[in-house]
Amino acid sequence: MIPPGLRRPVLRARRDAGFLAAGVLPHLALIPVWSWGVAMTAETRNGPFALPTSVAVILFGVPVLTAVQRARHRALLGVFLPRPTRAPQRRWPWAAAARWLRAPRSWAQLGYHLLLGPVLAVSELLVLTALPVGLAGATCSAWAWELPVKVREEWFGDTTQLPCYTLGGLVLLCAVPWAAGAAARGESRAAMALLGPSPSQQLRERVDELDQSRTGLIEAVDAERRRIERDLHDGTQQRLVSLAVNLGLAMATQPDLPAGAREALAGAHLEAKRAIEELNDLVRGLHPAVLEDRGLDAALSGLAARAPLPVRLRVDLTERAAPAVESVAYFVVSEALTNVTKHARATRAEVTVRRVGKVLRVNITDDGLGGADARAGTGLSGLAKRVGSIDGTLQVSSPVGGPTTVTAELPCER
């Protein structure tokens, strides 16, 4: 029965010792192969046969041993060694072999198994051998007296040396768990560095993963916005329209209503129409249906027509962009025109949208007072974050006295 305080260290030491024991044979697997090739070449001078054969066996065995090491680390230590990213496989085996030989990580695996493997095997054997040696030394005072006198004197000399052997064995036993843990951690770090992907490749994979995750999140948010827009348009808005119609019919068909009731109906009818207008603005702010149905040109045309100042619109698009890009472009124009209306005191504005290569460029210019600053925490800062969510850039040029120019460049292909 293991005491509760020692259970965890004992289990960890047993795990590390099992991990080291399982690594001896895989680390020594290639020694017979290259030893045979060297011996055959040196003794029989049959190098044209022995050397290529041993090299072929080694190259064939490296991926197998790498898979064994990955399984060993995963099963015994719970350490996952990711596989280096490979290019799409071709039909011809020789092409795949040539591509494997050209990869830098393949040579790192070869160095691990051919050069570092024997060194690790020696360290594993030393740690594993220390366990029985320490156990024998720690218990020698007990079993040495069972030996014949001549054998005991031959092995241990003077009996006063037995306590020294016992003390040394105890020290060795205490050092074995630490040595096993250090060896296991060292092997894991070496395997992670040589058998897994390089740090630059891991960084690229992580960046790609985050980019895909962000793209999925943007698409999910956009889909949810469209769902809310449809629900408001088909549900709440239709009920308000029906309410306004019924109130209008009630005033038209009941001419003999008291003045107080007619005034209340007129007020309710006016509030219902205001609520419909506010809901229309909210729905258009979430995601205008015309943007999805007819594209960015039609949506911006409606936006320019509703603006309280003259807006000159020019849209030069030969094909539609991705829905997320169109949505961001629409809200860039919407927010910019809102700022022009509220703060710029402008008399006119100009909106230009055109495709330049793989970039959708949106430009909004007004003749207002200027002085807009995207870093001041206004709506422009939120707009810059929204543009940046699809790897776009937002530039604001607004000197005091005007004019103000907002330019957004949105990548259409990612």
Image: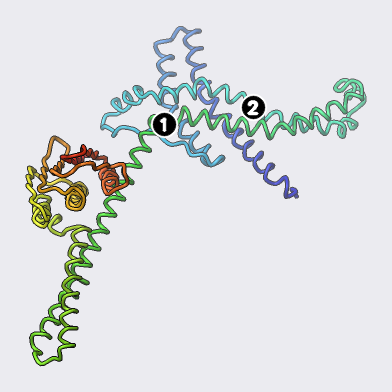
Q: Quadrant of residue 188?
A: top right
How many residues crowd mark 2 within 10 Å: few (<14), some (14–19), many (20+)? some
- Give the residue displayed 31% in from the left and 50% down from the top: 217
Residue in front for this viewpoint, 206 or 355 = 355
CA–CA distance in space, label 2 to label 1: 28 Å
Q: Quadrant of residue 203?
A: top left
Q: Quadrant of residue 373?
A: top left
Which type of secondary structure does the marked residue at label 2 adopt? helix
Image coordinates for residue 247, horizontal then vertical, percent: 15, 82
**Is residue 256 left or right of 279 when viewed as pictured?**
left
303 versus 374 height, above or below:
below
Sooner in the amino-acid sequence: mark 2 or mark 1 = 2
Residue in front for this viewpoint, 256 or 400 = 400
Which residue, given by chain and number where applicable, does mark 2 sit on?
A: 125
| Dot 2 amino acid type | Leu
Q: Are marks 2 and 1 in contact (CB under 8 Å)?
A: no
Image coordinates for residue 291, horizontal then vertical, percent: 14, 55
**Is residue 310 left or right of 373 when viewed as pictured?**
left
**Tag count:** 2
Which type of secondary structure does the marked residue at label 1 adopt? loop
| Quarter of the C terminus within the rendering | top left
Label 2 or label 1, whichever lies nearer to me, is 1
- Give the residue displayed 87% in from the left and 23% down from the top: 156
Residue in front for this viewpoint, 17 or 392 = 392
**Is residue 163 left or right of 26 when viewed as pictured?**
right
Which residue, given by chain and number where applicable, does mark 1 sit on?
A: 197
- Give the residue displayed 62% in from the left and 40% down from the top: 15
Res. 247 visible in picture: yes
| Dot 1 amino acid type | Pro
How many residues crowd mark 1 within 10 Å: few (<14), some (14–19), many (20+)? some
